[in-house]
Image (tube, helix red, strand yellow):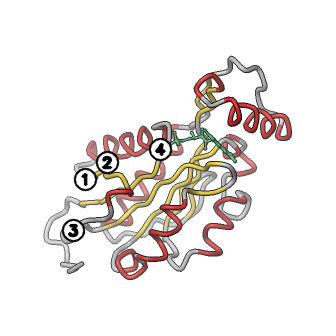
Amino acid sequence: MGYRPRVSSVSRILLLYSSVYGHTLKISEFIKADAAARGDVVEVRPLADGAGDVAGFDALVVGSSIRHGKHHTEVVEFVRAQRALLDSRPGAFFSVSLIARKPTRQTPETNQYVREFLARSPWQPQLVGIFGGVLDYQRYRVFDRYAIRLIMTLTGGPTDLHTNVEFTDWDKVREFSNRLSALAAGRASAGQAAGCAT
Ligand SMILES: Cc1cc2nc3c(=O)[nH]c(=O)nc-3n(C[C@H](O)[C@H](O)[C@H](O)COP(=O)(O)O)c2cc1C
């Protein structure tokens, strides 16, 4: 774990993601590229592979999509098992779901998945991002297709089974990435914005 004080102005950030169809990975890679433009280094790893050696990282990030109303079990188990490691550094979390396409579901208080996750998690990240995901009916198994269509019907989303749409607001991801760099550099950024809370 060995946390060493920073010796350079470049932040090194470890981002662990959990994704089924790759959109959480796409968001992770976007954060990596955005941070790189500021000179920061984000290493993106599948959470399933574990955290590995975190020596040398200034901050840790966990990113997860939602499946059937929950963040992935591996994420829930990881934050329980790795609390000491997660608490050893500034930490951030982001959640990707279809419900988060709605501006009214983009804070930890108004997004039920994130609210429940944080209520049960022993780890309390300093920064939370909540991003809309992808809806691509044709990609899903038949059961999932109709389950998601039911969610869309209940929440006023697209129900045409040929819909393929990305609801991610990349400006919000950029804002999260900016705040992440500030957090890793020991400059907790003030204020709160939709889809991104400190
Ligand atoms: C099987 C399945 C179940 C899902 N369940 C939910 C859900 O309960 N609520 C929600 O808001 N989004 C739900 N989604 C939407 C995903 O969170 C969204 O598509 C996200 O972009 C997936 O990211 P990933 O590709 O990284 O897994 C579901 C998607 C799939 C494929």
Question: What x and y, as percent, mark residue 31?
Answer: 38, 46
Closest to the observer, 171 or 58? 58
Labels 3, 2: front one = 3
- Residue indicated by mark 1: 40
Under circle 1, the secondary element is: loop
Residue at mark 3: C-beta within 8 A of ligand 1: no
The crowding category of the residue bearing disc 1, from other C-alpha atoms within 10 Å (few below 14, some 14 to 19, many at least 20), is some
Q: Amino acid at mark 3?
A: Asp
Going from N to C along the chain, the mark reached first, 4 or 3, is 4
The crowding category of the residue bearing disc 2, from other C-alpha atoms within 10 Å (few below 14, some 14 to 19, many at least 20), is many
CA distance for labels 3 and 2: 21 Å
Going from N to C along the chain, the mark reached first, 1 or 3, is 1
Q: Amino acid at mark 4?
A: Thr
Labels 2, 4: front one = 4
Query: Disc number at residue 35?
Result: 2
CA distance for labels 1 and 3: 19 Å
